[in-house]
Image (spheres, rainbow, N blue to C red):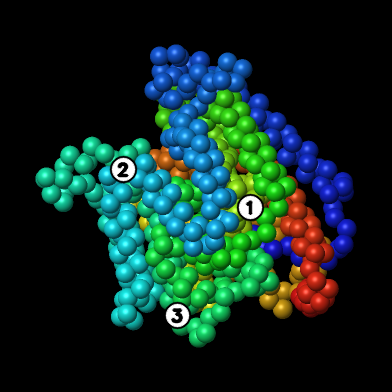
Amino acid sequence: MIKQEQTRSQHRFCSVEFCIYYVAIAAAAWRFVWRGWHLSSQVSVAAGHDHHWQYRLQPGWLFGLTQDLSDIQWRVFREGLPYAAGAMLVFTMLSRVVQYVGPKARAWYCFAFGFCFIGILHQASIVFPLTLTLANFCMADSKKPWLSRPTAIWMGNCAALLMTRMIHGGTFGNISTSLTFLDAYQGPLQWQTSYNLVALRHISFAVDKHWSSNQLAVREPVRAQLDTLKARQKASLPASAYNLITYLAYVYYPPLYIAGPICTFNSFASQFRVPMRLQHKYVFWYAGRLACAMLLLETMSHSLYFNSIAKHRLWQRYGAQLRLSAADMGMISFWVLMFMWLKFLVIWRFFRMWALLDGIQVPENMLRCICNNYDIEGFWKGWHASYNQWLVRYMYIPLGGSSTRLLNVWLIFTFVALWHDLEWRLIGWAWLTCVFFMPEMMLKKAAMQTCMAPMRAKWFYRHLCALAGCINMIVLMAVNLVGFVVGTDGILPFLQRCLLEPWFMLGTFVVCFSAVQIMFELRSLEQRRQAAIQPSSTRFHAVTHTART
């Protein structure tokens, strides 16, 4: 939970202490894989052929095994992958030709292709998102200062998002009975499904335009000023860049429209005007990593059926055959989270690769493996990272940044919950996350005070940090177990099982403690590598600051 300071230049990976940690983690990993395979086989046999379709356990293509396709997002993505790949090929080939004409022609092309793209996805319902998009542009481009201010933009887009959620997208029949026949043409993707991402792009364009208009004599940025995505997000563009066509091209950019990653308007438009340098070797390597992740996910869905087990609570139906222990319930939670992480990794990387092939660089969403996190702050910086960066730029900093941090987290996580969907379950999850996040932030701040410097130099400080991180991991796993597996009604039975199996709690503690120790060392290695590539002057200041603390 608390950042571990380490002044030694040599790592501990080969020490006897860490060898013990490796043994503990390897034993737990073997147990999880072996028991997971055995339990999934039991579920497949217990469900029988007649119930396989009910639980979305379908015949797979890998070694004749049954495949778990109970997750609707992954199932729809797999079914639509050939069409998405075809659209990616056509869009990229035509875009490469248009790019030789100039940035204006590219903006028109992206807008035209995007219009056709969402027309196929939403068919007649395209009217609804386009209406809201044009209304947002009118607000941002209004000559009335109160209407184009960020506060008004936020209120308008949040109201539109909430209205969209409450009426489930609406119908033409609600507008006029004479238009009811258009409701038969909804398209393969409901427009409100992806409108939450559209709303983020609305806010990004309007707020970036407002901030740019408050700066005097904004010049065209040069390539040297736009060498990173972070620099492109901050660099304002000339007023001519905030035009309707570029705005529509940004909102309905085909590679990022369905699932993201999220890109700010400044970053997107600047890459039209001053493209970033992308090495072909990196794009090919990225495509190879995507293929490996997709193969791993397919292998997992053919061998571990925990998403279907958790979704349909099959331990209640087949409890006599399965005889699940507390360790098995914890294992189900672990594999469900692993599946979710790997699923989003594949989906987000596919659409990011599409953007890279078009020459547009956007943030990577999954920065770390889900097993490589020991605190809430680090987890949310690495999970859906582009959304985290968007929240920092448009919510966290305008609300006061670190000076009002303890209040900001409540507003931000509440917005995140409502942004996903209107469910009390998500609101409860958001507030529960804030409850655990606040003591973590206070402990981190207290640990970095000057008076704590003697404590940080003690040999046992690292182990205290690992203990705190271990407790944090166990609490987070318990929250996810309640949220994704047993539910609120299963809390007491699960706690009773834990009390009857003390070895499970002890084993969980040992494995989490070992994992946190290795994570500390990995973070220290990352910091040393980062310092090695910094300029000498920057490195000198960083080392001086570290020596002081």
Amino acid carrying label 2: it is Gln
* Disc assigned to residue 123: 2
At x 60% / y 65%, what residue is drawn?
274
Q: Label 2: few (<14), some or many (≥20) within 10 Å?
A: many
At x 57% / y 75%, what residue is drawn?
220
Element under disc 3: helix
Task: Work out whether 259 lies above or below 362.
Answer: above
Q: Label 3: few (<14), some or many (≥20) within 10 Å?
A: some
Residue 521 drawn at (x, y percent) = 77, 55
- How far apart are the alpha carbons under marks 3 and 1? 34 Å
* Residue to which mark 3 is pinned: 213
Task: Work out whether 489 lies above or below 467.
Answer: above
- Nearer the camera: disc 1 or disc 2: 2
At x 50% / y 86%, what residue is drawn?
216
Residue 71 drawn at (x, y percent) = 46, 34
At x 42% / y 68%, what residue is drawn?
243
Q: Residue furthest front?
A: 101
Q: Earlier in the sequence, mark 3 or mark 2?
A: 2
Element under disc 2: helix
* Residue to which mark 1 is pinned: 367
Task: Work out whether 193 lies above or below 410.
Answer: above
Amino acid carrying label 3: it is Ser
Task: Let me know if residue 415 appears in the view.
Answer: no
- How far apart are the alpha carbons under marks 3 and 2? 36 Å
Task: Work out whether 71 lies above or below 62.
Answer: below
